[in-house]
Each structure stands twice: as C-alpha cells, then as structure tokens.
Amino acid sequence: MNKILVFGGLGQLGQCIYKVSKERGYQTIVFLDEIEGNILDINVLSGLFSKERPSFVINCAAYTAVDKAEDDVELCEQINKVGAGNLARFCAEHNAKLIHVSTDFVFEGNLPKLLNENDIAQPINVYGKTKLEGELEISKVLKENYILRTSWLYSEFAGNFLKTMRKLGADRDELGVIVDQVGTPTYAVDLARAILDIIESEKLAYGTYHYSNEGVTSWYDFAKAIFDISEITVKLNPIPGSAYPTKAVRPAFSVMDKAKIKNTFDMEIPYWRDSLVKCIQELNLLEK
C-alpha cells in the first residue's frame, strides 16, 4: 500500500485512525503530531512531503475550541484556513490526494431539514467560518480532494462530550443539558473506518461528503443515553440553549444527509446509539 500521512495524528480522530489502521494491518501510515506535522510551517511541510512522498494525506489537524475561537480568531483562521490550504498546495505539488475533515458547523442550521452537500453553507460562528474557508482554500488549489463534514465527534480517546458527561455524572447528583440543539453524535472510530474505506476503494470520486452516524438526537437525549448505557444514576434536566449562553452560537439543527457517501462508496453507516454502546464498552475496558 502507498504511504499515508496523518496530520493531527495525536488528536481524537488521529488516535481512532491509528486504532483502525492497526486492526487492518497498515504498514505505511505515518502519524504526525502538531510539531513534526506543523501545517503552518512551510519548511516542515516541504521536508515531510519530499521525504515521505505520500499518496494520501489525511488532515485531522484543526482548531476545534468553538467558544475560545471567538476571541482567538487569528490563530483559528491560521490553522483551519491557511493550514488546510498549505496541505492542499503540497498535495498538488507532490501528486497526493487529500482527505480533509470538516464540520456541520459550516451551516446556519436554522431549519429542521436534512442538510446535503449542495445546501448553502452559512456559518454562524468563527470556528464554522474558518472551517468553510479551509474547504474553499483546498478546492481552489487541489482537485484530488475528499472533504468530509462530520458532527458531534466522540470516542474513548482525548476529551469529548461522552467523557465529560461520564465524569460529571459520577461527581454530581443533578445536571442540566441543552435540549433544543439537534444533530447526530458520531463515533470517531466509525469515521476513521469510513476514511480508510475511501482510500481502499480506489474510487476517484472527489468532492464534499457528509458523514455522521445515522439517526438524530439532542444533546439532552445524547447525555441520557450515555448515563443509561454507563449505568450512572443522575438527575438530568432538559434546558434551553438560552439558559446556558456560550460565546459561540451553535446551529439549532445540523442533521446531515449521508446519501451521497453511502451511494458513492457503498457504505453502511451505524446508528448512533449502537455505536455509543460499543464506545462505552471500549471505554470501560480502558478504565479497568
């Protein structure tokens, strides 16, 4: 198999790709941290691409602190826009294909309808704006790209909503969780499998795709499922988003239509709650 470089290789999704690549016996995949794979350092990228000569590049590197981004606009833009563009230019120069991970936050999410790849992207926060700008930078300089928009990522690795809820549930008797923001939780291991499936398919069906687990839920119902499956007893109160103000505005409804990726790559996508059960089982094993 030809060489694959994974930028952001120590982050949540990078660790999930590592797990799946080990299961599949990959030998030629290189995971890069934010220093050795600094997407803002042209000299670092030049040396990496010249040395490794990858056939595929997977970009998991991103500024993802949604609320902090509202005050840290320049760095967020540098990583999510400029860094993505840098990778695309080096991929173009070295004949590599790019798989870039983006987000449902490129949408305003003000209508209760499934969002497909042709819907107009109108982000309502800095994070979403910079991720959309990154998509556009890539598309300007590199035809050979797959942009995968995903949502509500969680896993047994790194920090995420699942792990936060389990910790809070163990420490508190009562919690309030937002009930009027609706989307789809995505097990990052499932996304990792989808990314490697695209590479293994050898299909040159470049373009933008939506990938999340199947189904729809609110943050409140997601938390309820986490506590039920984890057998954690806590009083859970549904609260409106207005009762928990944040610096960044979130889409109220960001459920994505996955028909394109399923049809193009003959892909079966698990239901979100089924994947949550698997993830919690993995997490329980790690915590023993």
Image (cartoon, helix red, strand yellow):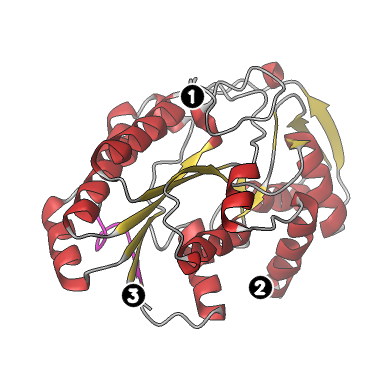
Q: Residue at x 75, y 65 (%)?
A: 278
Image height of 227 relative to 285, above or below: above
Q: Amino acid at mark 3?
A: Asn
Residue 121 got which mark? 1
Total numbered badges shown on the rendered structure: 3
Q: Position of residue 126 (x, y in %)?
A: 41, 25
User: Which residues fall within the magenta stretch?
Assistant: 30-38
Answer with mark 1 or mark 3, whichever residue precedes in sequence. 3
Depth check, front residue: 230 or 5: 5
Amino acid marked by disc 2: Leu
The disc label shown at residue 286, or none: 2
Check if mark 2's residue and mark 1's residue have beta carbons within 8 Å.
no
* Image spot of residue 61 (x, y percent): 37, 51
| Residue visible at 64% across and 36% down in the picture | 256
Mark 1 vs mark 3, CA separation in Å: 34 Å
Q: Nearer the viewer, mark 2 or mark 1?
A: 1
Q: Quadrant of the C terminus?
A: bottom right
Secondary structure mostly taken by the magenta-highlighted segment of the chain: loop
- Closer-to-camera residue (272/265): 265
| Marks 2 and 1, the one that precedes in the sequence | 1
Residue 2 numbered mark, or none: 3
Q: Secondary structure at mark 1?
A: loop
- Which residue type carries mark 1? Ala
CB under 8 Å between callouts 2 and 3?
no
Numbered circle sitting on residue 98: none
Alpha carbon of mark 2 to alpha carbon of mark 1: how far?
39 Å
